[in-house]
Image: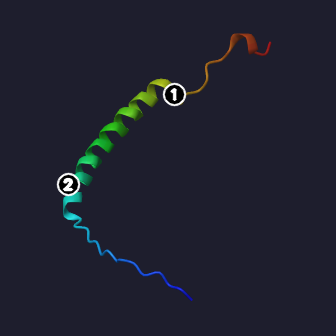
Amino acid sequence: MWRAGGVVHVCRLDPAPLASASAWLHFYERHWEERLDALEGLFRPAETEPTPNPEREER
């Protein structure tokens, strides 16, 4: 049986610099969620009782 040998690379990640990037992204995530929710409110009809249609009234 033949076995391939290779070079092993051990990598480490320092998560500290990612904390500031995460905070920055979190700020803009909240910013855009608020803006998109407001935009959605403009396009979605209000959750109220429907106005009666005079043509469909029972006589």
Q: Residue at x 19, y 59 (%)?
A: 17
Left or right: residue 20 compared with residue 45: left
Label 1 crowd (10 A; few <14 / some 14-19 / many >=20)? few
Q: Is residue 15 above or below residue 39?
A: below
Q: Residue at x 22, y 67 (%)?
A: 14
Left or right: residue 1 compared with residue 15: right
Q: Is residue 16 above or below residue 5?
A: above
Q: Nearer the viewer, residue 18 or 50?
A: 18
Element type where label 1 sits in the image: loop
Inter-mark Cα distance, 2 to 1: 36 Å
Q: From the image, tell me which residue sits under label 1.
A: 44
Amino acid identity at mark 1: Arg
Looking at the image, the residue that sits furthest to the right is 59
Q: Position of residue 42 (x, y in %)?
A: 45, 24
Looking at the image, the residue that sits furthest to the bottom is 1
Amino acid identity at mark 2: Ser
Q: Position of residue 56 (x, y in %)?
A: 75, 15
Q: Residue at x 45, y 29 (%)?
A: 41
Q: From the image, tell me which residue sits under label 2.
A: 20
